[in-house]
Image: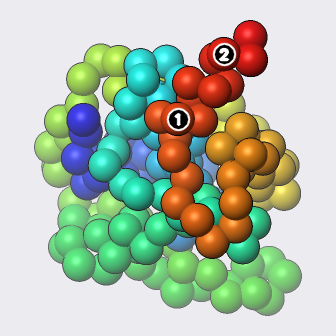
Amino acid sequence: MADLRSVMAYYAKNYPHKDELSKARLTKMVYLADWKAALDHGAPITDIRWRFNHYGPYVDDIHNMALEDPAFEVRKEHTMFGNRRERIELVDEDLSVTLSSSEREILDHVIAETRKLGFDGFIKLVYSTFPVISGTKGKDLDLIGAAETYRSLG
């Protein structure tokens, strides 16, 4: 299992549109990696306990790590529509990332699938995942159980 710091740093280093790494986008990219890992390997990449909050998966873990870890910085900005957002940036480019090759493959897959999506398309992708579709608002998302159910559906 990868540590969250390495996953966040990998995304921050390798995502081609660093200005798009808002708190919401980075959080949901980590979710997508956990979901893909649960599907492919029977276990998520991180040890996050995902919660179905309002419309989809959410936790404060990513934001809290970015606020507390000096390798990251949270920048308060405005979108082009005037809405406030927080963008997470890696400020320590020399930070060592410890990930297995299969973990890197999953993170690269998430980057490849999401990098061309605007925020609306990105959110639609996240909300269309099986754990969200089959989950219950306000409850934890069981990614391992959802992956087993999803695979059994054929």
* Residue to which mark 1 is pinned: 145
The alpha-carbon separation of the residues under discs 1 and 2 comes to 11 Å
Q: Is residue 84 above or below residue 112?
A: below
Callout 1: few (<14), some (14-19), or many (20+) C-alpha neighbours within 10 Å? some
Coordinates of residue 31 in the picture (x, y in percent): 53, 48
Q: How is the image coloured?
A: rainbow
Residue at the farthest top position: 154
Spot occupied by residue 118 in the image (x, y as percentages of width and height):
80, 52
Residue 149 vertical position relative to residue 96 in the rendered view, above or below? above
Task: Say whether marks 1 and 2 touch (CB < 8 Å).
Answer: no
Q: The N terminus lies in which quarter of the figure?
A: top left
Q: Residue at x 55, y 53 (%)?
A: 141
Could you say whether the residue bearing mark 2 is in a helix, strand or loop?
helix
Residue 8 or residue 81, whichever sits in front: 8
Depth check: 18 or 32 in front? 32
Q: Amino acid at mark 2?
A: Ser
Above or below, 35 against 68 in this view is above
Q: Is any part of residue 32 visible from this angle?
A: yes
Q: Looking at the image, is 22 positioned above or below residue 5?
A: below
Amino acid at the residue labelled 1: Gly
Left/right placement of residue 131 relative to residue 18 reads: right
Q: How many marks?
A: 2
Q: Is residue 61 left or right of residue 5?
A: right
Q: Position of residue 76 (x, y in %)?
A: 52, 86
Residue receiving disc 2:
152
Residue at image x 25%, y 39%?
A: 2
Q: Secondary structure at mark 1?
A: helix
Residue occupying image coordinates x 52% and y 60%:
140
56 sits left or right of 147 in the view: right
